[in-house]
Amino acid sequence: MDHTIPEVEQASVAIYNSVERFPIRRIYCVGRNYRAHAIEMGADPDREDPFFFMKPADSIVENGATIPYPKMTSNFHHEIELVAAIGKGGINININDALNHVWGYGVGIDLTRRDLQNQAKKAGRPWDMGKGFDKSAPCTALRSVDDVGHPDTGTGSIWIKVNDEIKQESTLDLHIWNTAETINYLSGFCELMPGDLIYMGTPDGVGPVVSGDTMKGHIDGVGDIVINIA
Ligand code: MN
């Protein structure tokens, strides 16, 4: 066998209006960060601190891509989410300083093998195979804070259509934990570093997509995402 050390590509996401790319270190995701979604998942939104799960950096998918229907599932769900990209790292980041750590924002879809996630929940097992599989993290080109400000300090809308039918529709001010609070809390557990993405959680209305479907997502001021299922 050839023992040449393989070259591994740095995962990255596009930057709006730029040929440069934003390198991805880690992808954190906030669970149940909209009341109505927490309730549809059978949880009590008033009783939980934020909690997190992760996706591999290379699960990122370019806007406009066609992805295969994933293996090992028959209940593949869309979750439209604001994505915050960390540009400056830190531990125990002060809430008043937290937004200064954000480089920019994108529109993401937290793709989920819901059947595998539900089996894992029931068995008290990790969610990785339900959440952190190949091509599970579509995201638009990031727009810098100079360009978009901090979307969830306002009441911008967030929605996703499947085949032009609206499935999820809400506003960013309804995040239970906003971006600043999430960075403050998460940085108490992990040192955040440049290149970390945070998927900020999805509104209610999650549901399945099948082969041949097109998902079109939107966040006011941030962008539009289109992903096709082959
Ligand atoms: Mn999610």
Image: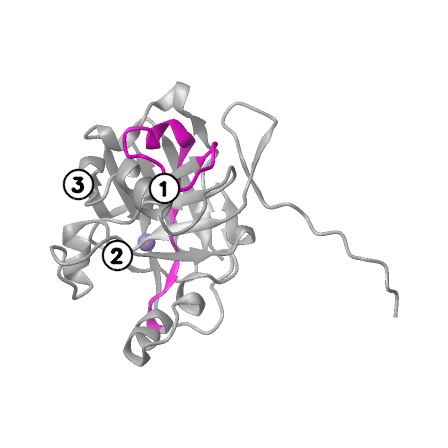
Farthest right residue? 2
Which amino acid type corresponds to the residue marked 2 in the rendered image? Val
Q: Residue at x 48, y 43 (%)?
A: 196
Which residue position is annotated with label 3? 174
Farthest bottom residue? 123
Which amino acid type corresponds to the residue marked 1 in the rendered image? Asn
Q: Residue at x 38, y 48 (%)?
A: 109
Quote the CA–CA distance across marks 2 and 1. 32 Å
Earlier in the chain: of badge 2 and badge 3, it is 3
Can you give x and y, in whole percent of width and height, for residue 222 in the image?
36, 30
Of residues 162 and 136, the one nearer the viewer is 136
Dot 2 lies on which element? Answer: loop
Identify the mark at residue 92; answer none if there is no mark. 1
Rendered image quadrant of residue 151? top left
Identify the mark at residue 206; answer none if there is no mark. 2
Lateral position of residue 156 relative to residue 110, left or right: left
